[in-house]
Amino acid sequence: MQFNSTLESIKTYEAGKPIELVVREFGIAPEAIVKLASNENPYGCSLHVSQAVEHILSKMARYPDDSMYKLKASLAKRYGVDAGKVIIGSGSDQVIEFAVHAKAGPSRPVLMSAVTFAMYEIYAKHVGAPVLRTTSRHHDLEEFYALYQAHKPSIIFICTPNNPIGDAIDAASLFTFMEKIDSDTLVIVDGAYMEYGRARDAAKALDAQSLIKHFDNVLYLGTFSKAYGLGGMRVGYGIASEPIIEALYKLRPPFNITTLSLEAATVALEDEAFIEQSVASNFSEMARYEAFAKERGLEYIESYTNFITFCFEAPMNGTKIAQTLLSKGMIVRDLASYGLNSIRVTIGTPSENDRFFELFDHLLKE
Amino acid sequence: MQFNSTLESIKTYEAGKPIELVVREFGIAPEAIVKLASNENPYGCSLHVSQAVEHILSKMARYPDDSMYKLKASLAKRYGVDAGKVIIGSGSDQVIEFAVHAKAGPSRPVLMSAVTFAMYEIYAKHVGAPVLRTTSRHHDLEEFYALYQAHKPSIIFICTPNNPIGDAIDAASLFTFMEKIDSDTLVIVDGAYMEYGRARDAAKALDAQSLIKHFDNVLYLGTFSKAYGLGGMRVGYGIASEPIIEALYKLRPPFNITTLSLEAATVALEDEAFIEQSVASNFSEMARYEAFAKERGLEYIESYTNFITFCFEAPMNGTKIAQTLLSKGMIVRDLASYGLNSIRVTIGTPSENDRFFELFDHLLKE
């Protein structure tokens, strides 16, 4: 059977390996496995969330409220915007998918950093849109601007803090950059790790309300998968001017969020103390990773997120290191598919991090 | 901001109104509202499912096992096929979306019945594919074949039992029809209500294993949203030959099913007794609806599902009837958007049905 030609160039996203797979492949007991591969919150989610979800288990048979009234109202209040400026996706991933389908195409390229979230390119391939990339690994807005002028992309992706390497841009530089971009180019500001970024450095804190007040062509993305500890529940969101939200809504399939996920996200938003504690623990543990790297002369990228990226030089090999750690039940992320000789390690709980240091140290001495 | 021109013709799916909305709009207490609008299982889901989900609430922070190993293995076993012939979607909706994006396009039309599931057309519009329809309200395979010969569609949609009117075709006729269709045309057999259809009439029972054994170009769809009582959890599936599954997989976003939904569906599949009881209760209550209609001389469509469609003639008006029932806290589905002067009523629990008969009777006497 013949399929549409766009399918030929689509690559599949390489996800962090789940614990279940390591159990099956290596025969390691689940409790002996540590997963530091998918930037999940190692402290789980707020207890209020588990309680609220447990309370509505009898509603699993009922389709979700497709207007998402409560969650949209909560997000609108949190960000100080109208509910009509909010769209909710199955992860912020899905909002990216809507945006790419709404705006990009074979003659409407997209622009992104040399190293950034893999789904931008994958969704661009879905619609046959050419992908332009800067040469700089970090977000270099001057290079972005030069490519913008030369190619007039339909979408510019700014991922800050940037997954998978952890860098972030100053909010002020983004505003200056935005001033120079024409109003028909959609700028997607992916703030999936913003709860971490703003805590480490206030200069990196991007305020969605202010962004969309100043610019009609920006789409800010947030997620419940990282700091909020709901990676398994698939809820993200976009905030933008009404014309953008209305266009994306046309591509939203009905019931894209489960009944339990809507409740989980709504309740998660109310427990700010949980986020503060998670973020504070993250950076106190991050300091241990940085000290570990400095003591051993390992290169790492300064991170505004809940992960840290170690960069290797031959003969050290990120893929081999990740594989060796995996065989011992420690799941980290090999970044070879991003063209990097690096591993990305999620900052875990203190004991998970102890285990990483122990195994990595052992490996470095071999 | 300009968006892709395909967006202009996209209509939004009209979902059954959720209870929360009726509470807000009519100020009726939630416990006084009966929802017979979305063909949910009125008995909820298996108790084993709620228990299993409760047991893994601590896993909400973890991304789902993206290989969906357990659920795919369970489905493969149930249908007697290899796991490589199974794909899982966020509702069978999403599998339809993958198929349309993989196969249809502006010069590759899709063919469907005059009255059938609205999402087929909506997804076709996403990719700018022309929509061909039979004139017959019920699935008329001769008419399907004539249109197939005239237009060579890329996809033929067969919804059996058919939502939103409840008719079903004989399995034998579908096999005869399939023999005449070339191998490059994808035939999607949507069996969302098959658990009900096969129970009412064995001649309507389509066996996915046998279908895909005989035909490389068929995609069978099933769902956990109806008989399995998991409408809020968003899990459906497709079964087809490997080349079709591999093509659809290219369009699957990672983590399209939540961690809790994967567990819920896997456990739901094990409790066959729950399905048998739900289906048996459904048809004993359906008999009450049929008797009710006959006593009052109301036209209805013989249904192989968990809903029944009443057809009206002027001056009776389906939209007004649905609206009047709604104002009394009874949510049913107006089929005006399908071009029908009809309402569709989900078969509820005995007491929910009592309430419907009472309100509808009152309305008929006004």
Image: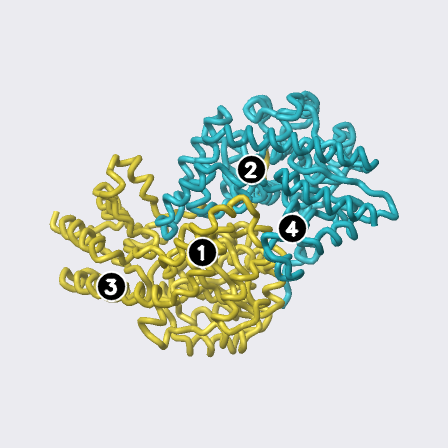
Chain colours: A yellow, B cyan
Chain-order first, disc 4 or disc 2? 4
Spatial separation of the CA atoms under disc 2 and disc 1: 24 Å
Which residue in the rendered view is the most extreme toward the right?
B315
Are labels 2 and 1 on one chain?
A: no
Label 2: which secondary element: strand
- Relative height, residue A276 to residue B101 (above, below): below
The amino acid type found where label 2 is placed reads: Thr
Q: Nearer the viewer, mark 3 or mark 1?
A: 1
Measuring from the top left, give residue B303's x and y in whole percent.
71, 32
The label shown at residue B15 is 4
The label shown at residue A286 is 3
The amino acid type found where label 4 is placed reads: Ala
The amino acid type found where label 3 is placed reads: Met
Measuring from the top left, give residue A33's x and y in whole percent.
25, 44
Count residues near mark 2 (Cα–Cα under 10 Å), then give few for <14, some for 14-19, many for 20+.
many
Which residue in the rendered view is the most extreme toward the left?
A365
Are labels 2 and 3 on one chain?
A: no
Spatial separation of the CA atoms under disc 4 and disc 2: 17 Å
- Nearest the eye: B37 or B108: B37
Chain-order first, disc 3 or disc 1? 1
In which quarter of the view is residue B356 placed? top right
